[in-house]
Amino acid sequence: MKGYNSDYGGGGGSDGSVNGEDFNSAGSNSVGQVDSVTITADVHSVPTTGEPNSVSKNYKDGKLDSERYYDGDGNAYLDIDYSDHGNPKTHPTVPHEHDIWFDDDGGFHRGRDKGINK
């Protein structure tokens, strides 16, 4: 599929595994503790809150599209994207990560892509 790096399509192997489910196949040092893995398919938007210390892996057309990581309070803090979102000029590096934060009013913010923190 255009915009996907096939080297990152199926999960991680040695970078992380919980109950047989791989995560962090990009090898990011930004990933914290992960106690559970959730799998979704073909969803447009992954929730901004989830199980504490977890990751939600989203697949599109059978390929890993993104991983969203949740902190100990269940708030999203990091996205790792495994595609260029159909826009290689804006997202030339695949995979790449985005920091996530919430403002004082609870508004969700996703930072610019910054490559993988290794």
Image (cartoon, rainbow, N blue to C red):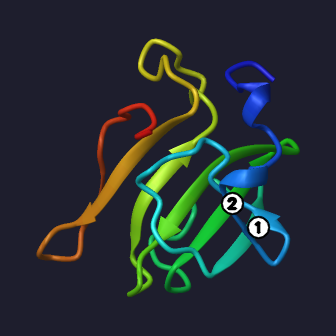
Q: Residues within 10 Å of mark 1 (few under 14, many from 20)?
A: few
Extreme-top residue of the structure? 89
Query: Residue 4, position in %: x, y?
Result: 71, 26
* Residue 60 appears in the rendering: yes
* Labelled disc at residue 39: 1
Query: What residue is pinned by disc 2?
Result: 57
**Residue at 48% in and 52% down:** 79
Dot placed on the residue nearer the N-terminal end, 2 or 1: 1
| Side of 8 relative to 75 (left or right) | right
What is the quadrant of the C terminus in the image? top left
Q: Quadrant of residue 78?
A: bottom left
Of residue 105 and residue 115, the one placed in the foreground of this image is: 115
The residue at 39%/77% (across/down) is 75
Q: Is residue 65 left or right of residue 75?
A: right
Is residue 108 something one can see in this rendering?
no
Residue type, numbered disc 1: Ile
Question: How far across and how far down the image is residue 69, in percent?
Answer: 51, 65
> In this orientation, which residue lies closer to the viewer: 102 or 52?
52
Instruction: Answer with left or right where residue 15 lies relative to residue 69.
Output: right
Q: How many marks?
A: 2
Place of residue 106 in the rendered image (x, y in percent of width and height, measured from the top left): 22, 76
64 or 107, nearer to the observer: 64
Q: Are marks 2 and 1 in contact (CB under 8 Å)?
A: yes
Q: Residue furthest front?
A: 14
Which residue type does callout 2 highlight? Answer: Lys
Q: Is residue 55 above or below residue 90?
A: below
